[in-house]
Amino acid sequence: MNEDIARPRQPSMADVARIAGVSAQTVSRALRGSPNVTPDTNRRVLAAVEQAGYRFNSAARALSSGRSHTIGLVLLESGGYYSRSAVTAGVESAAGAAGYAVSIATIAGLDAGLMERSLAKLADQGVDGLVIAVPLISVTQKIEDLTREIPTVTLDGSRTQGARVLGIDQAEAGRLATQHLLDLGHRQIWHIAGPDEWIEARQRRQGWRECLDAAGIEAPTPLEGDWSPDSGYRQGQIVAMIPEITAVFVASDEMAFGVIRALRERGRSVPDDVSIVSVDDIALAAYCAPPLTTVRQDFYGYGAAAVTLLLQGEAAVEESTVTASLSVRGSTAPPRQS
């Protein structure tokens, strides 16, 4: 008989949870020494460990000591390949320099249930801290509990009571971009926004609207994309058919690339006919035709700074905001004189 087939299955954390009458997540918390586990539950878990004959593997030992030297990173699959890659690189670089590995969980959409499962998975791995780069507008009690138990930093995203927040002032980014166009003399400034369920998209739209209101200009109804160049291209075709538009604030560089192509195909020049300003300043922005004027976001730096903030522990501030800056290039100019 094959020895691998004959070998009995080793008890798992799920077995311990079943015997103790608790969830596997509670077993994980008890082994990690979480203060949110009652003494009675802790005794039941330890008794179940002994009854099941559960042997700690390296991950379980890390949980019991509270030191796995691993940081969990939660990302969204959509929303910009370049920004996601840069944040990941920044987190991994800073974590590696501090002697930590990084465990990555990627969720498919802005869904609290997906977030809960990803956080629970990372908690079961015994991560020492969490960096959440997902912009959930609302969070559940379970998410609140996990981010309270595990030190957490969010990047321009989910706000929970236990997490520290690091990010750029997105409303200020919208105001900077819009004010630049106003300063050039534009008065018909439209906006192609990101998806409404994103915090960043709402805040950038807010900054655009506030800036126009302060100038006494009525804000037109914003168009909406999904962060992709294709959505920018589709909305750019609409913009191209409205001759009085002389300037557009686009919520991301990738959408701006699509807008510029659509305008060019419709015979409208950037910036002679329409000025374009966006947000992100990804590496390709400087090599667009024309080079793109955009509000800079240092995604790599944000990822690294999140790890630094995480490792500062109790001494860290609850919220850190990075000042936005504008990179002025060739996609913006004063409106053409008629």
Image (cartoon, rainbow, N blue to C red):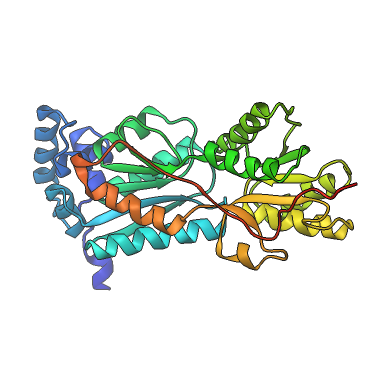
Left/right placement of residue 228 relative to residue 41 reads right
Q: Residue at x 71, y 46 (%)?
A: 184
Depth check, front residue: 128 or 59: 128
Depth check, front residue: 175 or 170: 175
Left/right placement of residue 74 relative to residue 8 reads right
Image quarter hosting the N terminus: bottom left
**Outermost residue to the bottom:** 2
Position above or below: 52 against 268: above
Could you say where residue 276 lies in the image, as x and y percent from the top left?
71, 51
Could you say where residue 205 lies in the image, as x and y percent from the top left?
62, 35
Residue 155 visible here: no
Q: Residue at x 69, y 40 (%)?
A: 182
Left/right placement of residue 46 relative to residue 274 reads left
Depth check, front residue: 275 or 76: 275
Q: Residue at x 48, y 61 (%)?
A: 85
Q: Residue at x 43, y 37 (%)?
A: 158
Could you say where residue 251 lies in the image, as x and y percent from the top left?
63, 45
How many badges with numbers are in the image? 0
Residue 203 visible here: yes
Could you say where residue 301 lies in the image, as x and y percent from the top left?
40, 57
